[in-house]
Image (spheres, rainbow, N blue to C red):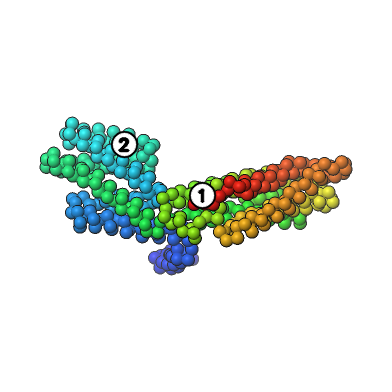
Amino acid sequence: MVRKGIGPATVSNKAVPRAARWFARARDFDGHERHVVLILLKSAVAATAAWVLANDVMGTRSPAFAPFSAVLMVQVTVYRSLSQSLRHVAAVTLGVAIQIAAGLLAGPDMLTFALVCVITLAIGQWSRLGVQGPQVATAAFFAFSQFVSATDLSDRLGQLGQIVGLVLLGSAIGVAVNLLLFPPLRYRSARYAIAALAASLGGLLTDMAQALRTAELADDRTSEWWRRANQMDRATAAAQESVYTAEESAYYNPARLLRRNRSPLPFEAYRTLIDALGRASGDIASIARGLHYNRPDDPADPAVVDLHATLSDLLEAVGRTAEVLADLDTDGIEARLDAIDGHLASAADACARLKKGERSTDPRKIEQTRGYEAVIVDATRLVEDIRTAFGDIRAPEGGTAP
């Protein structure tokens, strides 16, 4: 039997359509792909402008420092560009200053270079410099090269001062391009992250509610719910990070002044929602675990059927709440919040019926539903967590996002 290999033609046949789909998404949707394209374009513009100024206009000996710094300053938010530019300039200045001091005191030899390595690498660990810490040693190495190749002290100081000047120039150009050319706002990224988390939660709750109504509670089904609920921890963390980036993207950003770039809810409300959804996933995991380990003697007993139906009503109402959250937008936000109020009222009613059933004194009913006490407690906590979150959002202090 001849086995077909994967040749260049096969790879090409798969890669071209995949690339076409990627660029189509960048063109049609304001998502990750478009953000990547904009970063690439802005980086190219910043690097080219820095090179032209440093090489063609100023005629410096080492013009590459300017575009190198410019590209580093094109960040995902304007605020990050500004903060990183300050750290970058500080790191480079420290590296050059240490090289000047060591070169003047000890001369440009191997021991001096080793000493500069130790000092700059140690300073690069300073937490205030963040990700720019390694630039201290990098700048010092380039400075040492310039120091060795220069002919006299004046030339040496001039070359090293030029490095700092080019870094300042490149950083300023990178920040300016990021600020003026499609300044990045991440409001939609925050909404997409919350929508994805809410949609996953809503889908899980709907699945559980339907299975409870039809008594399809096999071990593999309940264990799957348990696993899906536990896996939402990563989605919750990602959603929180997206909201943090969205809030940061508004700082010093002129695009936030446009009405179409407003967020439908304040960022604090987004964080409250994500926290509530994260707690809800934990509550759902506990409910799934309880259903997994508690098996009634007679699933067709009216008491068990009634309990499952009431629990199904509760989960379905909370699931509908999550589905509304997955479709939050600037237009009609009040109508969506009103719809959520209605779903939460249904969930609260189901919760009250669960508690009423738990207080039953019928011995047969108590016997058939034994072991469901923890499930009822978890379901009650689920409703309270969601209601509390929306109570905070409805509070008068909730404003509008910048």
Please name the residue shown 47% across and 66% down the image.
Answer: 28
The label number, if any, that marks residue 227 in the structure image: none
Whether residue 383 is situated above or below residue 203 in the rendered picture? above
Left or right position of 71 against 366: left
Return the disc, 2 or 1, that comes first in the chain's sequence. 2
Q: Outermost residue, front direction?
A: 396
- Res 358 → quadrant: top right
Please name the residue shown 39% across and 65% down the image.
Answer: 8
Q: Outermost residue, top direction?
A: 105
**How far across and how far down the image is residue 205, in percent?**
67, 53
Q: Is residue 352 visible?
A: yes
Give the residue type at disc 1. Answer: Val
Determine whether the residue tagged by mark 1 lies in a helix, strand or loop. Answer: helix
Determine whether the residue tagged by mark 2 lies in a helix, strand or loop. Answer: helix
> Which residue has dot 1 on it?
243
> Which residue has dot 2 on it?
121
Spatial CA span between label 2 and label 1: 34 Å
Whether residue 295 is situated above or below residue 47 in the rendered picture? above
**How far across and how far down the image is residue 124, in percent?**
33, 37
Whether residue 28 is situated above or below residue 91 in the rendered picture? below
Q: Outermost residue, left direction?
A: 151
Please name the residue shown 30% across and 56% down the image.
Answer: 47
**How far across and how far down the image is residue 324, in percent?**
63, 57
Observer-nearest residue: 3 or 388?
388
Q: Can residue 3 be seen in this view?
A: no
Observer-nearest residue: 93 or 14?
93
Give the residue type at disc 2. Answer: Leu
**How far across and how far down the image is residue 183, in percent?**
40, 56
Whether residue 94 is situated above or below residue 63 in the rendered picture? above
Left or right position of 142 against 266: left
Crowding near pointer 2: few (<14 within 10 Å), some, many (20+)? some
- Res 116 → quadrant: top left
